[in-house]
Image (spheres, helix red, strand yellow):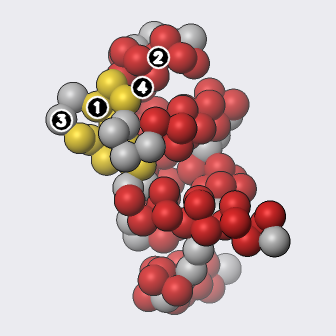
Amino acid sequence: MKRIDRRTRMLAAGLRELFILGEDYVSMVACQDEIDVALLNALREAGATGRQSGELAAQIDINHRHISRRIQRMNKRMEQEIGENIIEKHGHGWKLIPRLRCDFVAARRKAEE
C-alpha cells in the first residue's frame, strides 16, 4: 500500500501542471480542523496581498503565535501530497501561492457552469 501511495503521489506531482486543485481537495488534504479551514479561507479572501499573522489571528480568533505553526503543518501535508507548499511567507505576512489562487478561481467557475 505504501508503495502504491508513493507512486500515486509521484505521478500526481509530475502531472501537477495539468491539475486544478479545488478548495474541497485542498481543505481535505491540508486542513486538520475547522481552524485550519478558517485560516485557508481567510488567506483566500486576502488575495494577492496576503495578511499578517496578527490580522489572521484576530479574524479567526486564535493566538497569533499559533498561525505560523499551523501554516507550516498545512504546508507539510500538501508537500507530502503534491510536492508543493500552498502558503508562502511574503514580507511579514502570509499569502496563498499564485497557482493555488488561480486554481480556486478556475474551480469555482467550473462549478458555476
| Residue drawn where x is 59% and y is 74% of the image | 20
Instruction: Inspect the image, locate mark 4, and give the three-letter code of the amino acid beneath it.
Output: Ile
Q: Residues within 10 Å of mark 4 (few under 14, many from 20)?
A: some
Residue 111: quarter of image: bottom right
Using the image, determine if residue 72 lies above or below residue 60.
Answer: below
| Residue drawn where x is 49% and y is 64% of the image | 102
Q: Which mark is residue 91?
A: 3
Using the image, determine if residue 87 lies above or below residue 5.
Answer: above
Instruction: Inspect the image, locate mark 3, and give the three-letter code of the amino acid beneath it.
Output: Gly
Provide residue 10's location: percent of width, then percent of height.
47, 84
Closer to the eye: label 2 or 4 = 2
The N terminus sits in image quarter: bottom right
Q: Residues within 10 Å of mark 1 (few under 14, many from 20)?
A: some
Closer to the eye: label 3 or 4 = 3
Q: Is residue 1 left or right of residue 50?
A: right
Provide residue 60's location: percent of width, then percent of height.
57, 18
Q: Is residue 101 left or right of residue 22?
A: left
Q: CA distance from mark 1 to mark 4?
A: 11 Å
Provide residue 105's location: percent of width, then percent of height.
59, 61
